[in-house]
Amino acid sequence: MAKYQYKAKDWSGKVVKGELELATEKSVIESLRANGLVPLEVEIKNENIIIELWRKVSGRISGKMISNFTRQLATMMTAGLPMTDALALLKNQQESGSSLYIILEKILADVRGGMSLGGSMEKYMNIFGEAYVASVSAGEEAGVLEEILSKLATNLENENEFQGKVKGAMIYPTIVIIGMLAVMVVMMIFVIPKLTSLYADFGTAKMPAITQGLMTVSNWMAKLWFLFPILFVAPPIILKIGAKNAVFNLKKDKFILRLPIMGKLSQTTIMASTCRTLSMLLTAGIPLVEALRIVGTVSGNEVYKNAYNDIAQKVQKGFGISVSFENTNVFPVIVTQMVATGEATGRLDEVLLKVASYFSVEAEQSVAALTAAIEPLIMVVLGIGVGFLVVAVVMPIYNLTSSF
């Protein structure tokens, strides 16, 4: 298939521009006419490779953009605006040629062609997410799309708000740590070697062990400085390659969950996100087994993915959901207790939403604890490092002067 640019007029005489990806120019014209448009110009689009590459790099669609789009679409549809008109308005609000503009343009063309909104969004599962697309499709089938979109928007807004708090809390420690590493590298590669040549003039004066150790490390770093970029590049590459291996992911995620403070933060964050998503999927009318599998996929952690898949299999075999949760040995006691309450009352979606709120508060407290722990720890490490350098540098001079 090829991309075609078109210019057409709608029923009110307004000129409409856009793109369609179809096999032939004739197919584009037929599609435009089927959507009530009068074709004026249709031509194949020649993509500039450099422009296309820059668009992919700079045109990343953030979670906040999806959240805003969802909230606006829900508001417009609740107000009684037809879906096609709402999508057209939202598309025109985006910067022409941006990634979101192009995606909304294609979704609008699909919807005008008779495809459902959820069916069109399936093509962009990597952008919207499996839970999002499944909820939209279920909402369309049940005739409650406006309500589902509103809950999706609230869910996305809560997640974006929490992620913003985490990022904000980590800005100060990250800047300090990067500054410490930069100063250390400069000292070890440029400053200490100068002192080494100075101490060589001391003749037979014996250097303290701490100074000799510092000089040895400095010489090693000065000779192998070109390897330092690898220390920053290698971990992301290893993680990216390892992400394709389930065993690697499982070991990595287990290790993260065992970390003293970060492990607790990861657990509470995952619990808040998955419980909220599961509640939303059940509200949308998606069957429990399918909802559990979707939540496992979007959990972002192999430990919880396996746990949710195991629960789905047990529920499919006829086991109770509360018993299935309890037997995984992954979820906290409060989760199994609340799930049992929801199962008994028939209000599992509402109970899960309350569980999500509880863990959201826990996650925020974990972030506060992490920030409070990191700041003094950084100061202690910085003080020890400065003290070590001062002692290692000053002690030889002190020994030399005291020998006279």
Image: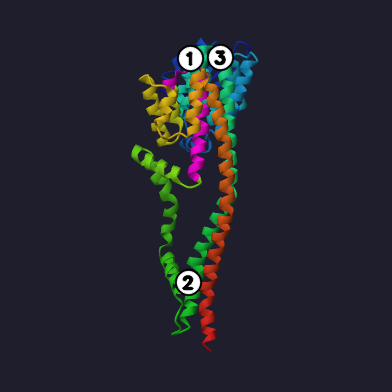
- Identify the element where label 1 is drawn: loop
- Identify the element where label 3 is drawn: loop
- In the rendered structure, the answer to whether residue 75 lies left or right of residue 138 reads right
Q: CA distance from mark 1 to mark 3?
A: 17 Å
Nearer to the camera, 368 or 191 = 368
Q: Position of residue 132 (x, y in %)?
A: 50, 24
- In the rendered structure, the answer to whether residue 230 lies left or right of residue 34 reads left
Nearer to the camera, 142 or 43 = 142
| Marks 3 and 2, the one that precedes in the sequence | 3
Query: Against 189, is 238 above or below?
Result: above
Judge whether residue 19 can be spotted in this image: no
| Marks 1 and 3, the one that precedes in the sequence | 1
- Which residue is found at the position 56% from the left and 60% from the top? 380
- In the rendered structure, the answer to whether residue 247 lies left or right of residue 63 reads left
In the picture, the disc for residue 193 is: 2
Q: Which residues are magenta?
A: 262-290
Residue 41 forms part of the magenta stretch: no
Q: Position of residue 325 (x, y in %)?
A: 43, 28
Query: Against 297, is 385 above or below?
Result: below
Residue 271 forms part of the magenta stretch: yes
- Amino acid bearing label 1: Met
In the picture, the disc for residue 115 is: 1
- Identify the element where label 2 is drawn: helix
- Amino acid bearing label 3: Val
- Amino acid bearing label 2: Pro
